[in-house]
Amino acid sequence: MTPLQSSAGPQGLTFVRLAALPHGRRILLRLSGADVRRFLQGILSADVEAARPGHALPAAILTVKGKLVTEAILLACGDGSLHLALPAEAADEAIALLDRHIIMDDVALARAEDVEFAMVWPEPLVAAGVECLATQYPGPGWLVFGAPAAVAAAVASAAEASPATWDARRIEAAAPGWGREITPGTFPPEVGFVAAVSYDKGCFMGQEPLARIHARGQVNRVLVRVHAGTCPEGPVELAASDRPQAGHAATWAPDPSGGASGLAIVHRSAASPGTVLSAAGIGPVEVRSGPLGDDPGVKGRK
């Protein structure tokens, strides 16, 4: 695909400002120094060495026990530099953790508050003063970022999507969201976030517990798609006849065929298409998929 030039106006493009979404605001963490790539490879769950310029990758910053401190978007910019887009809610903790691990490394961190992030689709765009990176996270499309005025100018002729439209896009792509499905204190496989984990790159912070999960091939809770007859206004708790706390669903969007589609974290025993759960106030909720973004483990791989 050929990037659309902003001078002609990005025809047919849709965009959403991440700051307009629940839990969507991002902080740009710029990294500089000779050891940035090696340093990040030892911290992030993603394979930093596989990052190609012009792309963004999902990653996780984990505790030594393998549980999420936060997710992060690894930004592989066109000039070869690597930076991080961090959830604003978790940025302070994440930056402090990264700073503590810079010991003999030639790495400098610089927090940038005055940066706007947006997602555009179905085509990329080229505009002055912004970077446009292909990505599948936080959803499929292109992540655009730069000074707020530059981003506003770049998307000026595009159609702005509603949060519900963006959630529908995430649901279709099975892309879990920070503050919705992805929460601190969980393992990435529990929240459908295995795309952020490399099992082949070697050691990183929190790698050993995830390697044990990978060898065993099982976590008790997984991400699934669900469907309800009405669209809830917020998160709902899910119950099964034999399991009162079967899971919860935090992302919902109206379904064109009627009712609402959603993403839910449920107990593995309920993660089969056709399973019917209940939720107070909205009635039955049907599971519409098997586990998504799950790690079947070494024994589960064909």
Image (cartoon, rainbow, N blue to C red):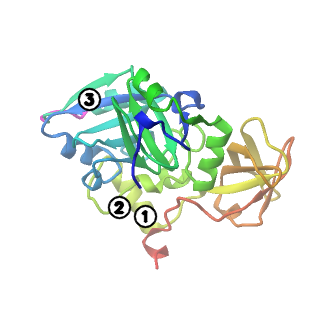
At label 1, the amino acid type is His
Q: Nearer the viewer, residue 169 or 1?
A: 1
Q: Which residues are magenta?
A: 99-104
Secondary structure at numbered mark 2: loop
Are the residues tagged 2 and 1 within 8 Å (C-beta)? yes
At label 2, the amino acid type is Tyr
State the image coordinates of residue 88 (x, y, percent, origin top left).
46, 27
Location of the N terminus (image quadrant): bottom left
Q: Is residue 174 left or right of residue 127?
A: right
Q: Is residue 281 left or right of residue 159?
A: right
Answer yes or no: is residue 202 visible. Answer: yes
Count neighbours of disc 1 (C-alpha within 10 A) and say few if under 14, some if 14 to 19, many if 20 or more.
some
- Residue carrying label 3: 99
What label does residue 199 carry, if any?
2
- In the picture as drawn, the residue positioned furthest to the bottom comes out as 302
Q: Nearer the viewer, residue 260 or 102?
A: 260
Of tags 1 and 3, the one toward the viewer is: 3
At 80% from the left and 43% from the top, the residue drawn is: 231
